[in-house]
Image: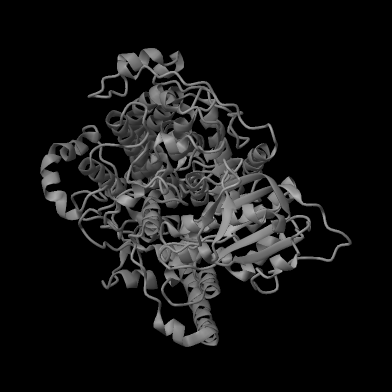
Amino acid sequence: MLGINKERKMASRLTHGMDLRAMTQSLVALSEDNATYFASQGPGETARRLAGAFTGIREQALGLEPALGQLLGVAHLFDLDAETPANGYRSLVHTARCCLAHLLHKARYVAASRKSIFFRAGHNLAELEAYLAALTQLRALTYYAQRLLAANRPGGLFFEGDGGLSADFLREYGTLHKGCFYGRCLGFQFTPAIRPFLQTISIGLVSFGEHYKRNESGIGVAASSLFTGGRFAIDPELRGAEFERITQNLDVHFWKAFWNVTEIEVLSSLANMASATVRVCRALSLPPQAFEIPLANNPQLNVTISPPVAHTGPGPVLVRLISYDLREGQDSEELNILARSEGPRSLELRPRPHHAPRSKSLVIHIHGGGFVAQTSKSHEPYLKSWAQELGVPILSIDYSLAPEAPFPRALEECFYAYCWALKNCRLLGSTGERVCLAGDSAGGNLCLTVSLRAAAYGVRLPDGVMAAYPATMLQASASPSRLMSLMDPLLPLSVLSKCLSAYAGVEPEAQEDQEQQALGVMGLVKRDTALLLRDLRLGASSWLNTFLELGGRRPADDCSQSATETMRRSVSEAALQDHSSLPRESPKSLTLQDLSLVGGSTPPVLSSSEETLSSVPQEVNFFLPPSGTEDETTEEEEDNRENRDSLGSTFPDGFQPRRSSQGRANLSLQTSPIVKNPFMSPLLAPDSMLQSLPPIHIVACALDPMLDDSVMFARRLRGLGRPVTLRVVEDLPHGFLSLAALCRETRQATALCVERIRLILTPGAEPQVPPAPTKPRWSERSRNKHSPQTPASAASSPPSLRNPGLSQAQPSRHSGLSPARS
């Protein structure tokens, strides 16, 4: 493990220390040298595959470098400003550079060690072939980004073509092979400190998937996964293939169950043991009663705030009050009436001789979780740290989750709780002089839409919003950063689609299992105990068989006996299909030529756990299908036949990416025009609505598929003259707030969010309204062709960007933060 981390740090230094052209030239030269050497080592299988891998690396690097240079040459045109060099095009180029840097480091190591008796040919071959597959897919994404650049309107990051072309573009993109990014290459683009955690999450996910739909309780599934997931830690190729199968085929209820593992009492208690100790952590239930609140522009008039009623009718709104100090009002009888039982940890009040005075500020927090999972309990660790650092009470809203409560239920509940907090801030230990809305991911979206709704009602707006990596565009639209969902282990493409389809109300709900209801609590405990004991036996057998297989394998050069692996099929796979299990050829025994044929015209080669669900290419949409009904597609297909045919010309002659062997994705293709609602997709709100927003502070991740959501939303606000800041952290994944205690980089990024909140709570520290931006000279680009490298755009770019082999100077990424971007 120490050797792997050392290699990754060396590759990271190469990424930031060499320009693109020099890196490519060095990699090509080393690949040619290594390919020549191994080609001269005789007819051995390992030597032949090593020579083929280096030949493939050379070919992909030479094809990738001009395309990356072209994207980098125009990437600055899509930045918020010169101090904020961030958008999906830059992120895609950086990710490709990370892959090239790793291959360069590996090629140097092979060239220096290939004659040593300690050279592990099989291990290095597996890693080279994995990164070659990743480089091939990154080259395909680069061509897709060029296609977006040519088809988008000038200055836009989101694909806004006609419906037919958009659906076909995203369907074609969704057929790409993804498993290579979830095996040996998992998280290569992130900081080295975060990668062991991502590996643990991926192993837990595929193990959890084996026990899904057994009707076990959460602790039972987690315990069973712990004892039966050993082989996924040993075999990265198997883990990657299973990860792809799970993300592509299992429904939103699986992700809801997996993400809610952190809600288990034992795990949440362990997490809270390492967090700050607070005096107040109370779970409250706000009764569904209408109340009045003064209008912001005329306090003499009131507006009635009705309780949430969408989908499920009136019901209480659950919230959690967190405060580092016990302040006046927080133990009042009036608040005690609202307290809800949460076991022994529902009330953490300790007797004190006196109360701290009410704070002048209040933070209202809305948690993330893809609109479908988690509660404030999962976010308690960093919220307690916030309460300690800021010295203000925090009210976190536990809104109802999709698919059981789709849009607009969550928005109604969050707005109701926001207005209740404004009216009853004295009970929360605050005078309410300064109020900040803060949220991450889906919570960031809700913070923005609650502010829009508050403006529409005429009630007091928050003094500012801190939105961490928010989703502002929930429409079916691709962007350069969203292309990276192909490789993101926390936000895969199909998972985004399922979660947001559920929030829009088009994801079918699963019927509750009658057997589970009939068992009751004690029945579940007895059954889970029996299943756990059985899984212990199966787990021990699985580990023993795995080690016996590893010890009995013959060298790769010996081709007299084909390497076959028989693996026990998971219950979740059996639930998806009813085909018989057959022995499969291991990915480690496939030749480079065999791997290149996966998804081609010949039958795909499957790993030991893969089964083809359908030979038809999967129909996948990025989030939700565009407006229109499926019955109206016949005439549309005729009108857009030429556009669909042009998708094949996205790639140059002689290049084809690797295709997924998982068949048709299990995704909803229904229509939901509600995604254009500005209270669901605030990026689509008209200017008149955005003009009413308070100061917005956005903290985004450079490698997040949602990056373009933040950039485009900030650009819209900046264009309207509204106060907005955008800070972009480097080398961290989506959801870093939940990983705040993991490493130095996540702690620094979390501190940045706290600093943005403190800026909102400090009177007179609001960001200055920027001057009206001057329009870029987009007219110089051809409107009908949108060439990504027209003479006009080349002439307007800095000299370092005009050269396709040179990259613009980037800030140091080792700190986890980019320079000040206020």
Q: Quadrant of residue 375?
A: bottom right
Is residue 551 something one can see in this rendering? no
Q: Is residue 373 above or below residue 537?
A: above
**Which residue shows up at 74% across the image and 68% down it?**
333
How many dots with numbers?
0
- Given residues 137 and 768, the one toward you in this image is 768
Q: Quadrant of residue 12?
A: top right
Where's residue 29, x and y in %? 41, 27
User: In this rendering, would 498 be left or right of 765?
Assistant: left
Q: Quadrant of residue 332?
A: bottom right
**Which residue shows up at 35% across the image and 36% down it?**
158
Where's residue 75, x and y in %? 41, 26
- Given residues 64 and 624, the one toward you in this image is 624
Where's residue 22, x and y in %? 45, 23
- Given residues 817 and 675, the one toward you in this image is 675
Which residue in the rendered view is the most extreme toward the right? Answer: 353
User: In this rendering, would 143 be left or right of 460?
Assistant: left
| Quadrant into which the C terminus falls | top right
Q: Is residue 309 above or below residue 485?
A: below
Is residue 478 something one can see in this rendering? yes
User: In this rendering, would 115 be left or right of 64?
Assistant: right
Where's residue 149, x and y in %? 32, 30
Q: Is residue 217 above or below residue 116?
A: below
Q: How is the image coloured?
A: one colour
Which residue in the rendered view is the most extreme toward the front? Answer: 300
- Given residues 433 and 561, the one toward you in this image is 433
**Which residue shows up at 39% across the image and 28% down it?**
28
